[in-house]
Amino acid sequence: EHMPALELELLGDFRMRSDAGSLINISAKKSQAMLAYLGVKPAQLVSRDKMAALLWSSTATEQARQSLRQTLSSLRKELALISPDRKILVEEGDFLSLDPELVHVDVAEFEKQLGIGGEKGLPKAVALYRGDFLEGFELDEERFDQWVIAERDRLHRASLRAHSQLVEIQTRSGTRDGAVATAQQSLRIDPLQESMQRTLMKLYMDGGDLVNAVQQYDVCARTLKRELQIEPDAETRKLFQQVAALRARRGAESEDTPANGKKTILVVEDNLLNRELTSAVLKTAGYEVAVAVDGADALMALGRGHVILRRL
């Protein structure tokens, strides 16, 4: 088996590396696009006509074929510098492909590891997913760009499923730190997964880390509000209430008042002037004051610390 002469990274930014690991630059965007299209399934044969229609979708057929011939000519020369003895780009009559022995592609490896699955394949698959497919790569050629969007969506979903399955495996086997790291990684890829936000809250909660569990709810609520203009669903709110209740119980068990001897009162008031007046009166009377604008804000404050609830 031959050592790959070329590493093609399509998850995240488009990157090419030599067998020694150094970055290689292929100048023409159309050449990069062709390598990406052939690279997703390295052994597949793609006809020249299909490639021309894909990369020059807005051009007349004959002109598209001419452009393809020119692009292939310069790509051949650039690839010959990387692998002088064996051809990376295979041209068989009317068909084009990449030699799978000479090109290693992260997408193909990602899918292979997904196929293996379980404790053996999933960690490798998850590690390979450095970002969405061809992040930020656009050609302004409708057919190619549509293909990129479809592949990006397919691989994005596959990645989230892999993270989710791995979190389950790690939780079952008791490697909570690993499960937390995998859940965090999954939320970096897609922060709008409310079920994964809950999973991470539960992992913190089971580990006794109630502060992080509360903060995770806060992150979840803010993200949903900002991106989708919605509140967390009933299941998430119920989990948060459990965390807040645990914190309150823990606070009551450890001490009735904080170290400075002052009790904290929570003021819930949406009117700024009333809020400030009430806070000033309570501070003068020797209380610590926490403020909240509304019910959701109040729940967050309750989760964060030990307060005496006063209805004002």
Image: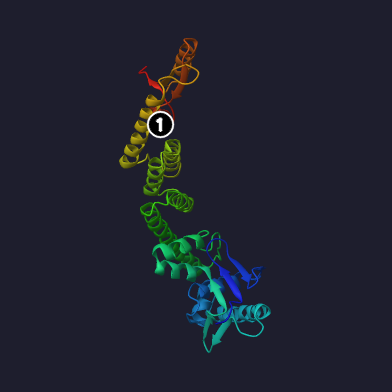
Q: Residue at x 60, y 84 (%)?
A: 87
Q: Quadrant of residue 116?
A: bottom left
Residue 28 percent location from the top left of the image: 64, 71
Residue 80 percent location from the top left of the image: 66, 81
Residue 200 percent location from the top left of the image: 41, 46
Residue 278 percent location from the top left of the image: 45, 14
Q: Secondary structure at mark 1?
A: helix
Q: Is residue 311 above or below residue 208?
A: above
- Badge 1 crowding class, 10 Å Cα cut-off, few under 14, some 14 to 19, many 20 or more, is many
Horizontal side of residue 12 vs 159, given as left or right: right
Horizontal side of residue 275 vs 32, given as left or right: left
Of residues 97 and 2, which is closer to you in this image?
2
User: Quadrant where the C terminus lies?
Assistant: top left
Q: Residue furthest top?
A: 285
Q: Is residue 56 visible?
A: no
Q: Is residue 29 above or below residue 61?
A: above
Q: Residue at x 52, y 74 (%)?
A: 39
Q: Residue at x 50, y 81 (%)?
A: 49
Q: Is residue 306 above or below residue 195?
A: above
Amino acid marked by disc 1: Gly
Q: Quadrant of residue 78?
A: bottom right
Q: Which residue is mark 1?
A: 303
Q: Is residue 206 visible?
A: yes
